[in-house]
Image (spheres, coloured by chain):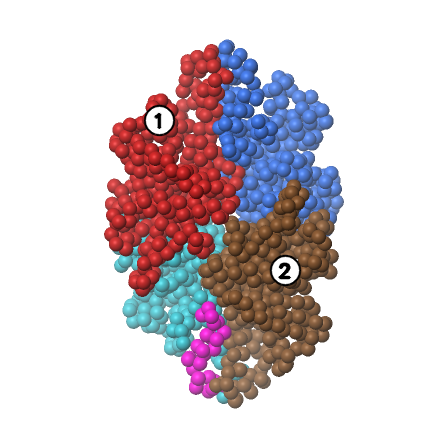
Chain colours: A cyan, B brown, C blue, D red
């Protein structure tokens, strides 16, 4: 029995899903978790606050704030909606960043996590491609121009299989030389429900924690590790294949039509048996099989522009929803 | 209930899987289907002949010969094994092509089907990238060199969403101008079992039939349509997500531990109920969700070289297992 | 002495340059060549008509109309200017196409010439990437939608080194199956002056003639060969290196400071000597060395969007300068 | 008069060219520069030692050792020759590295400089793609395996326009966290003669100095800056366009046929006049125009494999000329 697989079938990087699962498991709202929902243009914004360690334990996500923008329109091919969503991402991001807590004229370091050689993991590097980078020009710019632009630098270091180094080490090394005031880290995520793929953006002020993200197996990129605040932005690009198999079985048993004796049978055999079935189906790949839409390449392209647009608008006062198209070359 | 989805959960492009499913369904070997298995270096070769229309109907694959090379080594990162497998592909391909049935100095037209913008569908175009193309040089080459090289041309036209034209129409148009003697069409396939992903190559003399392949929705590329023989080569790069969900439920019920009352419950509710569960899990994507290994980009790269190597060896007497590395720049 | 090189040093695909060179050579305007210049937003539009065979011979370009849009803004990174230029390209293109001469509801076949594996030659395939393709949907679309969209199909076949087939043969094969009413062929061009790189678009109704374009060595894609009108669109992406060397020598001698005895020396030694010098500098590459801006990859990207935008606007009434950003995903 | 351009026309990153130019200028060998030439299979190896500061000043290259491997075969499409050349690169590299001066079980940090979005500048990042990376596995490997593999990590940070940070800062940041014992930095170079393009590899123990390389405008990556030895490896991928123009004029005047009065004219007008001519030809691009072979994309691919092969062989005892093909997936 591969323990990894057992975890994966219920795994999600989304706090909103983790919260829902905890509610479903316990049958009640979770203490220490506040939830606020707002309907915006083309989207629903959910703001979850994990207020204390106990709450963090209950939902398996660290203390902090998680903002989720859900928008079916992100996975449509409509650039106009994308620009609107960039504006909404920017609004929420600005709130999360708390610029007034940073020093005047802060330097922001945008980090694109993930592997450019693996399509569903390439979100981070692609977002970097669309970022408006200014730090190297900043000292040459006259003061009146600086009002419209903040100092922004970026790196997409690649994954450990490419570099041989923990990504967090590379980032920390750069932080120690460049002394930015804030990190924004972008990463592809794994969700629990396929309906999240390409339709949900999560932003949080908790940084990126060990074992989260699509690539896994990493040390965290957190304020503790980096010495400066870390905002994490992610979009689910995959659901683990074991989640699909597990869900099929769970759905079957939770269905009212399938009541009575069957459920008793199920309760007898339980998790281990279920895992064995899943492993038989997914062998020899197990944890490394992912579910994506066929058009994932195009989706990654669209989502990258959307997120990059949001970050560009949030960071540079000069860039707005109306002119963002001009900056996403 | 989406009928497409119902089909997809049992769908496979592999004759060897279709045959196995028919055997399982009927509980006996299929009349008119001959099967021959041979163990080769690093691989098992299965040759299936569908001898008549009745047999074709039973397994859902047209009359003809299907050769399957199964090799775990193809999805490892070992170039030496890849070259060996190219040699085995070449041996089987040569047998399938029947060069002695073609005219002397034939021209072979290699067609790379699929979408270069969608990683798991990009196998065909990538194979074309590695082909040794000679037709345009052929008339200028002195006769003594021609002994080592055959006249080969190629095209990767892209999919209908890119061209606006049925791929079969484009291919036929080129055939009518170039007058090749044989088509070899390469395509990414969908399998029923994840164990097939990146480990199985299918070659057949039946061409490519409407609705097969990863991209679907196409008219066939067959001898009937093209006026010349068509060899099809494919590798499964995806399993439909609905197959995974369906398998989870099926496995559960076929398990001896899960006997008695549950099975009765299942038999009552049957296919429609199962479909509804699957649709609930995979909504809103349904048919367009696919399962791939996380490292699909690299896998496609490796498989493309392997297949292209096999075709290059089979077509050009000068190219062998020992020197194939020099031709896959 | 390589004769190819001798040609290359004065070679240009631009009619406007060929005309200027002829004027300079003869010292007077060319009979049978009419020139009309118009200043537009961000650009200058020059319309050259080559009216008869004699004129064609004088400037080395076939009889027909050549429209040149010159715009420094195309090579800047300003998306707003790009969209404006797309609008201007569209205006000129519509005039050149003469839709009223085509049948009602025509099908237009857009062909992207060139090699996607060679950056400066990849313009054509990249333009295809941004085209709004509709032909395959056209029969399913209700009549009221058809008013906004024309039936458009496309192909980027690759170059002869990739396919083994003359590109004109592939195109003609598709024409014979699809029966379009017009071809628009896009190609990267070679110019005589580096100031043309990324700043000049040429559109003509003469098709593409043997030996033109960056890749050379091809049969023509003309109305005569295709049986339907062919509009050619091109942008210079390279200047041949031999042109630079040749120009350096010519400029030196045409300079007033460098008069008298030197010019006599030059007149004695002439072309052959000059060629030898050029060959010595460019050996061992000769004809295959090209001059491009360092940022050619980005330039190709920008120009492709600009041209594709223009074609999309010209072909589809529904697409305009105001909404074109939404169609260049 | 653009001073940059004046520099560029005689600019070279190759010590062997800089030395030749100095010899030509002064008419004698350069004091403090030792030159040793050895003929190897498919190649000529030239080892230049710049022994003191005076010599460094004379040829414009820092004190240290420069090894040049010249091989026409590198730009041919022959994989067998490429592997042989990888072996020769490895031999010279091993000598330059002086492993016995490093601590036992050293960690080597391979840095790919340059811009992956600009074809001729993409050499460094592409070499990283082919590197055998082991550092992250090294602690888990049993001692008997370690004999065959050294600990290697890598990074391709991108250029300042992408990151907003001096590349040297990023590298130093990583060095401070990872504590490697040696840096190997790969970069695309500019040469003075087109015959060098794709045919010459330079390795040196001097690191990379400010203003060298194709991208320019950078602080150095040197032992002084990094605190550990830095080996630099480069291949010329461009010649500046101004060099071609300048050479044309120089060749003309150095030609015996073009003697007497002309030379006097030239001597009167000299450098400023020449620069004005060059600037007229290359306007409006000046310094940013480069000369490359048309097939530069493929050339970069081939050279990257060749160099990566050499580094892999030099660093990992287990990897040899005979099995290197298996490691360049």
Q: Which one is nearer the viewer's eye here, D170 or A100?
A: D170
The residue wearing badge 2 is B94
Which numbered marker is on residue D22? Answer: 1
Who's the residue at 49% across and 80% down the image? A253
Whether residue D177 is situated above or below residue B26 in the rendered picture: above
Q: Which residues are magenta?
A: A262-286
Query: Could you tell me which chain the residue with mark 1 belongs to?
Result: D
| Chain letter of disc 2 in the image | B
Q: Position of residue B108 (x, y in %)?
A: 66, 53
Asked if one can make out residue C328 in the rendered structure from this viewpoint, the answer is: yes
Which quadrant of the structure image shows residue A93? bottom left
From the viewer's perspective, is residue D185 above or below residue D286?
Answer: below
Picture quarter with the N terminus of chain A: bottom left
Provide the secondary structure element on which disc 1 rests. Answer: helix
Q: What's the residue at 44%, 77% (across, down)?
A: A275
In-front residue for pair D256/C38: D256
Q: Give the image location of residue A40, x and y in percent.
A: 46, 58
For residue B87, side relative to residue A290 (left or right) = right
* Residue at x 54% of width, y 75% of height: B246
């Amino acid at each position: 029995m591969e323990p990894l697989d057992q975890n994966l079938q219920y795994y999600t990087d989304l706090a909103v899903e983790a919260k829902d699962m905890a509610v479903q498991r316990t049958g009640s709202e979770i203490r220490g978790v506040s939830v606020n929902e707002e309907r915006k243009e083309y989207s629903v914004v959910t703001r979850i606050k994990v207020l204390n360690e106990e709450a963090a334990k209950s939902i398996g996500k660290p203390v902090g704030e998680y903002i989720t923008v859900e928008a079916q329109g992100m996975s449509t091919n409509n650039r106009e909606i994308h620009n609107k969503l960039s504006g909404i991402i920017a609004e929420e991001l600005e709130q999360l960043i708390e610029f007034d807590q940073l020093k005047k004229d802060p330097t922001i370091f945008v980090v694109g996590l993930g592997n450019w050689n693996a399509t569903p993991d390439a979100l981070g590097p692609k977002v970097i491609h669309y970022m408006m980078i200014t730090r190297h020009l900043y000292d040459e710019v006259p003061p009146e121009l600086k009002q419209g632009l903040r100092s922004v630098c970026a790196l997409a270091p690649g994954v450990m299989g490419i570099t041989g180094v923990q990504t967090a080490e590379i980032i920390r090394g750069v932080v120690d030389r460049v002394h930015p005031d804030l990190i924004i880290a972008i990463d592809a995520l794994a969700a629990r429900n396929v309906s999240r793929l390409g339709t949900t953006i999560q932003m949080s002020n908790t940084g990126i924690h060990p074992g989260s993200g699509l690539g896994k197996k990493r040390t965290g990129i957190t304020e503790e590790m980096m010495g400066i605040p870390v905002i994490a932005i992610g979009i689910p690009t995959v659901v683990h294949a074991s989640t699909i198999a597990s869900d099929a079985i769970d759905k079957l048993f939770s269905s009212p039509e399938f009541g009575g004796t069957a459920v008793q049978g199920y309760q007898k055999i339980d998790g281990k048996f279920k895992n064995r079935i899943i492993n038989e189906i997914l062998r020899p790949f197990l944890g490394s099989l992912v579910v994506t839409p066929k058009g994932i390449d195009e989706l990654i392209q669209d989502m990258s522009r959307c997120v990059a647009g949001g970050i560009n608008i949030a960071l540079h006062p000069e860039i707005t929803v109306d002119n963002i198209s001009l900056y996403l070359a």
